[in-house]
């Protein structure tokens, strides 16, 4: 089985924005004095950094017998065909082609994805849509893991 693990980290520009939010809060607190300004810088920057880190900490993993995507753990037996999506096709499945019953692990800053059919008749979820930076590698890892079953 080909191991696969990916963390959908936030882009570097988001960290710059988090630092800018800390500076903005420091400027808001500036009229209250130096200590509140430094507290605003530290507190605002830390809160923004925690938010960016939390949003970018979601993982996709293929483990023996299952696919783990965020908080979801799906047995490989319940998964069907894997479709690699790039560019316009990935955007289409995120927007007007999307099914409201689908499990979607979206990260708007990642332009590629995979769409995985759910074949379990008892599961109302028609497919999984997973944003990924390496869709071909994820598809290969899933097919290898399913062959190993």
Image (cartoon, rainbow, N blue to C red):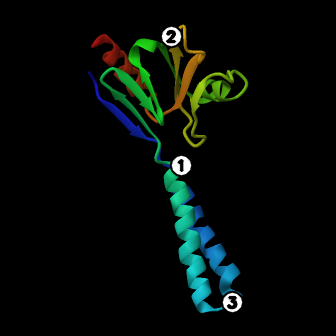
Task: Say whether residue 81 is left or right of residue 97.
Answer: left
Residue 97 percent location from the top left of the image: 69, 21
Asked if labels 3 and 1 touch by Cβ distance under 8 angstroms, the answer is no
**What residue is disc 1 on?**
55
Residue 63 percent location from the top left of the image: 32, 27
Image position of 140 with respect to 29: above or below:
above
What is the CA distance from the residue labelled 2 to the residue labelled 3? Answer: 60 Å
Badge nearest the viewer, 2 or 3: 2
Task: Say whether residue 85 is left or right of residue 26.
Answer: left
Q: Earlier in the sequence, mark 1 or mark 3?
A: 3
Q: Report which quarter residue 5 is drawn in.
A: top left
Residue at the image position 67 percent from the left and 86 percent from the top: 30
Q: Secondary structure at mark 2?
A: loop
Q: Which mark is residue 32?
A: 3
**What residue is disc 2 on?**
120
Residue 102 visible to the viewer: yes
């Amino acid at each position: 089985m080909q191991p696969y693990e990916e963390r959908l980290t936030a882009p570097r520009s988001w960290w710059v924005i988090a630092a800018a939010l800390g500076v903005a809060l420091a400027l808001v607190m500036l009229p209250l004095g130096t200590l509140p300004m430094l507290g605003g810088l530290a507190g605002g920057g830390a809160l923004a950094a925690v938010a960016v880190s939390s949003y970018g900490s979601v993982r996709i993993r293929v483990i023996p017998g299952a696919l783990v995507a965020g908080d979801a753990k799906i047995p490989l037996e319940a998964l069907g065909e894997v479709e690699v999506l790039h560019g316009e096709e990935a955007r289409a499945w995120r927007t007007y082609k999307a099914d409201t019953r689908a499990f979607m692990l979206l990260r708007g800053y990642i332009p590629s994805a995979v769409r995985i059919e759910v074949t379990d008749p008892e599961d109302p979820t028609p497919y999984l849509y997973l944003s990924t930076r390496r869709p071909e590698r994820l598809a290969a890892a899933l097919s290898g893991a399913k062959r190993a079953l």
